[in-house]
Image: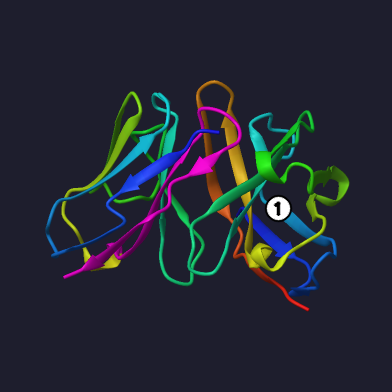
Amino acid sequence: QVTLKESGPVLVKPTETLTLTCTVSGFSLSDTRMGVSWIRQPPGKALEWLADIFWSDGKSHGATYLKNRLTISKDTSRSQVVLTMTNVDPVDTATYYCVRTNWNRGITYYFDCWGQGTLVTVSS
Amino acid sequence: DIQMTQSPSSLSASVGDRVTITCRASQSIGTYLNWYQQKVGEAPKLLIYAASSLQSGVPSRFSGSAAGADSTLTISSLQPEDVGTYYCQQCSSHPITFGQGTRLEIK
């Protein structure tokens, strides 16, 4: 059974750094198609993709306008992916989802298993 | 970045109706398009990938098609459990982008 579980703070102050951890299980980390993305959803708003990283080669991508604030990394030995967002603002208040990403390069790319999400509030 | 525009933003239909949701990309994306369903209080769920491939376990009343920059999600016979918000997502190129969502309710 594939599972992804987000963990991290529920409340962060403006200008601080947010660090979220995703712990995965149930799928092969050596599969070249498999990776993990972070997707967020502000309350009552649409989904927004933030970043992805792939197990086999460690290559990652990030949202254009957030690239200077985002870092995504993986710890294969712990089956974890970590997202770091610097200089947070109240507009970063959202539910953050960790999502398995299935990428058959040049053919398909989709999010087929989602964590339950974690609500992060940015407020002083 | 590729912009995704869904229409309508919301719709109300009766049980048994055929429902169509459209997604238009700011440039041609071919079949690099996925659809998700999100019920209130839940994480999204993958319905359709590669424009027309049904994800395992998804009812066959859901179908998708694509041509150029336009993609369509169709529910052939609306059921009460289909209430929720539907999102399209392009995967033609990074950064990955979603549509703004279509809220579907039962009349």
**Residue at image point 43% right, 40% down:** B4
* Placement of B58 over or under B93, stated as above or below: below
Query: Residue B99: x and y, percent?
Result: 43, 47
**Residue at image point 78% right, 79% down:** A124
Q: Within the image, what quadrant is residue B96 found in?
A: top right
- Give the left or right position of residue B62, taking residue B13 as reference: right
The chain letter under disc 1 is A
Q: Is residue B35 in view?
A: yes
* Placement of A63 over or under A114, stated as above or below: above
> How many other residues sit within 10 Å of disc 1, few (<14), some (14-19) or many (≥20)?
some
- Amino acid type at image mark 1: Ser
> In front: B106, or B4?
B4
> In front: A24, or A63?
A63
Residue B100 is inside the magenta segment: yes
- Give the left or right position of residue B42, taking residue B37 as reference: right
Q: Which residues are magenta?
A: B82-107
Query: Residue A111: x and y, percent?
Result: 54, 45
> In front: A80, or B95?
B95
- Give the left or right position of residue B102, taking residue B78 as reference: right
Q: Which residue is mark 1?
A: A25
Outermost bottom residue: A124
Query: Residue A118: x and y, percent?
Result: 66, 68
Outermost top residue: A106
Residue B99 is inside the magenta segment: yes
**Quarter containing the N terminus of chain A:** bottom right
Q: Within the image, what quadrant is residue A56 found in?
A: top right
Q: Is residue B55 in view?
A: no
- Give the left or right position of residue A118, taking residue B10 as reference: right
* Placement of B84 over or under A83, stated as above or below: below
Query: Residue B76: x and y, percent?
Result: 17, 49
